[in-house]
Amino acid sequence: MANSLVSIQIIPKADNVKDVYGMVDEAIAIIDEAGVTYQVNPLETTMEGELSELLHIVEKMNARMVEIGAENVISQIKILHQPSGITTDTLTEKYR
């Protein structure tokens, strides 16, 4: 079971890029390629996994934004670390 949830809202600053949403799609593709469980929400994407792995994914997302033209990147991150295990469903099951 995963020991962490990491939610990220990535905001690339790219005055020279017309499709910033396409850049965000690239960031989500990094998560998908990593093979972790994740959920895309309107304002952020939440990943489940081991904390070190998830932080490595965040690092790769930021690097990719720069590779495709971002001048800089703001990553707003929330972390829940629970060594005994945690999933998104654990936190949301009573609402579904």
Image: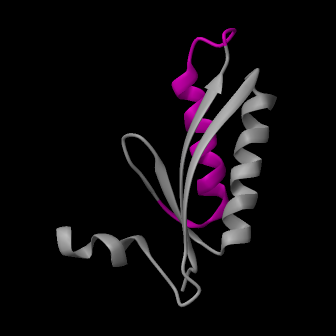
Q: In terms of depth relative to the viewer, which is nearer, 32 or 11?
A: 11
Q: Quadrant of residue 36?
A: bottom right
Residue 58 drawn in magenta: no
Q: Quarter of the image holding residue 35?
A: bottom right
In the image, farthest residue toward the bottom = 84
Q: Position of residue 37 (x, y in %)?
A: 51, 67
Q: Residue at the location (69% across, 51% down)? A: 58
| Rendered position, 76 above or below 84 | above
Residue 94 higher or lower than 16, as above or below: below
Residue at the image point whose x is 74% and y is 26% from the top:
72
Q: Which of 25 and 70 lies nearest the eye of the viewer?
A: 70
Residue in the picture at 73% in, 40% down:
62
In the rendered view, would you say 41 is above or below 83?
A: above
Picture coordinates of residue 48, whole percent (x, y): 53, 69
Percent x, y for residue 92?
A: 29, 70
Evaluate whether residue 96 shows in this view: no
Which residue range is magenta in the image? 15-38
User: Quick check: 74 left or right of 71?
Assistant: left
Most frequent secondary structure within the magenta stretch = helix
Which quadrant: the N terminus? bottom right
Q: Residue 39, relative to residue 1: is it above or below?
A: above
Rendered-image quadrant of the C terminus = bottom left
Q: Quadrant of residue 43?
A: top left
Does residue 19 appear left or right of residue 14 in this picture? left
Q: How many marks?
A: 0
Is 30 or 84 nearer to us in this picture? 84
Residue in front for this viewpoint, 5 or 26: 5
Question: Is residue 22 visible in the rendered structure shown here?
Answer: yes
**Does the magenta segment cover residue 29?**
yes
